[in-house]
Image (tube, rainbow, N blue to C red):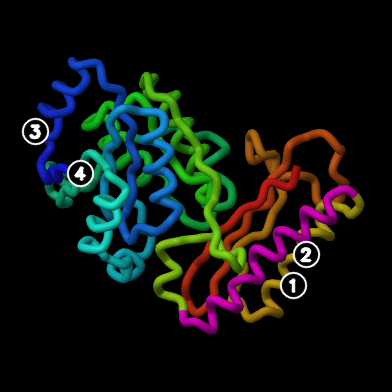
Amino acid sequence: MIIFREIAPLQQYLARLKKEGHTLGFVPTMGALHEGHLSLVRESKSVAGVTICSIFVNPTQFNDPADFDKYPITTANDIHLLVQEQTDILFLPAVAEIYPGGMSTTRHYDLGYLETILEGSHRPGHFQGVCQVVHRLLDIVRPHKLLLGQKDYQQCMVIKKLVELLRMPVEVIIGKTKRAPSGLALSSRNLRLSDDDKQKALALYKALDHMRAGIHARPIGELQETAKASVLAAGFDKVDYITIARADTLELLDPSAKWDGHTPVVAVAAAFIGGIRLIDNVLLT
């Protein structure tokens, strides 16, 4: 594996690979790698001749500076894992390399409805920061294929929207959420959970799974309220949302209605436990 910390030599190397006819797969990450990230690396290796992984903790997508400061940094272990997976290239830039002119930007990405709901409403400005860094990384790497994880469901939709806005010739591939044997969605934030909170955190996935079981018979609002109550009863501190939405647009469903039996829907959730904010989602149909 070749490690690049600067843009110019990385781009020179990638240009040579493209000239030789190689297809480039790109897996952007913020480090603290786990099986979810590594599964995307493997997927990239199956669909592209060369796999590039980036590790960059992006300051502009954190609403709370304290959350940025607490984000787990495990670079040595990350490198070890990527070497084991035979990753071709690791891009490991400093903040000044990604944002040489500073982190402020006057560009606004028109994300429409996606920015007004769920993560967008609870974390104002978050998706603008995501788009800022992904736009920058795509400009640098210029991959043929971009691999993302389904656990960040709304973020995947935002990045697909970004690619459309920029008219970039890149195929977006969404990998399935990877879970621990217990059902807990793998996340870098799990490193900050105590063993006790990890056990309690299972309630989030169980609540979403129960919504899948009840989607055929019970009203949407009733499913949502039952799920929220079960998560709080299990020891979560706060629920930002547990909601059922259209899987293709994230349009929220009418709480008073029942599922129509054919529209693809997804349950999405965000909740705090032990001061850590966890997100998860389950396709219900």
Residue 209, position as x, y percentages in the image: 73, 58
Q: Are marks 1 and 2 in contact (CB under 8 Å)?
A: yes
What amino acid is at disc 4? Phe
Q: Is residue 87 visible?
A: yes
Where does label 2 land, which residue? 225
What amino acid is at disc 1? Ala
Mark-to-mark CA distance, 3 and 2: 52 Å
Query: Which portion, as a residue range, is magenta?
Result: 194-216
Where does label 3 land, which residue? 8
Residue 196 occupies quadrant: bottom right
Q: Main secondary structure of the magenta part?
A: helix
What amino acid is at disc 3? Ala
Mark-to-mark CA distance, 3 and 4: 11 Å
Q: Quadrant of the N terminus?
A: top left
N-term mark: 3 or 4 = 3
Where does label 4 land, which residue? 91
Identified at 37% across, 65% down, the residue is 64
Q: Mark 4 or mark 2: which is in front?
A: 4
Residue 229, labelled with which disc?
A: 1
